[in-house]
Amino acid sequence: MEKSGKLALSGGCAGAINGLFGGGGGMVLLPMLSGYVGMEEDNLFPASVAMIFPICMTSLLSSGQAIPWSTALPYLIGGSLGGLAAGLWGQHIPTLWLHRFLGALILWSGVRYLC
């Protein structure tokens, strides 16, 4: 399969996971872009972030549910500030540390869901 087909398949898997569970598409996208598509380490996180936003918006809009703005707004403000800080400082964090942190976060999330 050519690279554009692999990218489309990776995006489709991320979108399906995101739509079914209301999040988590990025946890599928990173390993697929790395292992299946062979994307370079320096491009993984920025590409994943750029892809996951429209995937999340598509999942939200296709659900047919109203957005609870009063609940969402504080998270959007905090998330925007956190995203800004991570964008500015994240490029100075070694990729290995980012991988380990993401792996620990995925494991912690999995244990929380099981318990």
Image (cartoon, rainbow, N blue to C red):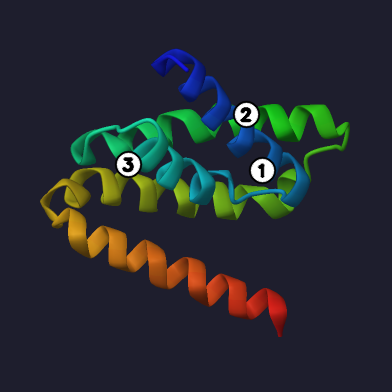
Label 1, secondary structure: give it.
Answer: helix
Figure check: 74 above or below 61: below
Query: Residue drawn at (48%, 41%), measured in percent from left and top?
Result: 29
To which residue does mark 1 refer? 18
Tell me how far mark 2 sits from mark 3, CA to CA: 18 Å
Q: Position of residue 34 (x, y in %)?
A: 34, 41
Q: For residue 67, what is the image quadrant?
A: top right
Q: Position of residue 84 (x, y in %)?
A: 31, 44
Near mark 2 (Cα within 10 A), the count class, few <14, some 14-19 or many ≥20, is some
Q: How many numbered marks have been drawn onto this rendered protein structure?
A: 3
Residue in the foreground of this view, choosing between 53 and 21: 21
Residue 24 shown left or right of residue 58 in the figure: left
- Circle number at residue 12: 2
Instruction: Tell me the amino acid under the disc marked 3.
Output: Phe
- Circle number at residue 45: 3
Figure check: 70 above or below 2: below
Residue 35 shown left or right of residue 56 in the figure: left
Q: Position of residue 69 (x, y in %)?
A: 73, 44
Residue 81 shown left or right of residue 109 in the figure: left
Label 3, secondary structure: give it.
Answer: helix
Q: Position of residue 82 (x, y in %)?
A: 37, 53
User: Mark 1 or mark 2, which has the lower sequence index?
Assistant: 2
User: Mark 1 or mark 3, which has the lower sequence index?
Assistant: 1
Instruction: Tell me the amino acid under the disc marked 1.
Output: Asn
Instruction: Tell me the amino acid under the disc marked 2.
Output: Gly
Label 2, secondary structure: give it.
Answer: helix
